[in-house]
Image: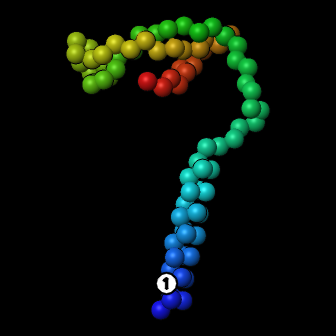
Amino acid sequence: MKHTLALLILTVLIVVAHASDAQAQRSLAYEPATVELEGRLVIQLKYGPPNFGEQPKTDKKLRVPVRRSRSGGFRTLPVSC
């Protein structure tokens, strides 16, 4: 009985340790770690919740930073709220 209990506890500890290790490796490393962007940062107004432009009168208006590249294209930058 003691052997079974010890084996069960050891199994649980290994599973928990493996799960926490997998959780820690969710982020990915990119190379190069430093990136240099060129262009101009402009702010565009976009429709937000609740309908994201479906009903402009009730939708929230958001100011979204957008990078304009030298070639003239726009790239929306991710921003956390």
Q: Amino acid at mark 1?
A: Leu
- Quarter that holds the C terminus: top left
Label count reads 1
Residue 72 appears in the rendering: no
**Image-based side of 8 in relation to 55, left or right:** right
Taking the view exactly as shown, the residue that stands out farthest to the bottom is 1
Report helix, strand or loop for mark 1.
helix
For the point 35% across and 17% down, the residue is 47
Residue nearest the viewer, comparing 14 with 9: 9
Taking the view exactly as shown, the residue that stands out farthest to the front is 2
Mark 1 sits on what residue? 5
For the point 54% across and 82% down, the residue is 6
Residue 57 screen position, x and y as percent = 22, 12
Residue 10 appears in the rendering: yes
Q: Quadrant of residue 18?
A: bottom right
Rendered view: 32 above or below 20? above
Taking the view exactly as shown, the residue that stands out farthest to the right is 32
How many other residues sit within 10 Å of disc 1, few (<14), some (14-19) or many (≥20)? Answer: few
For the point 74% across and 27% down, the residue is 34
Rendered view: 75 above or below 6? above
Residue nearest the viewer, comparing 21 with 30: 21
Residue 67 screen position, x and y as percent = 59, 14
Residue nearest the viewer, comparing 35 with 16: 16
Residue 17 screen position, x and y as percent = 58, 63
Q: How is the image coloured?
A: rainbow
Rendered view: 9 above or below 4? above
For the point 51% across and 89% down, the residue is 2
Residue 77 screen position, x and y as percent = 55, 21
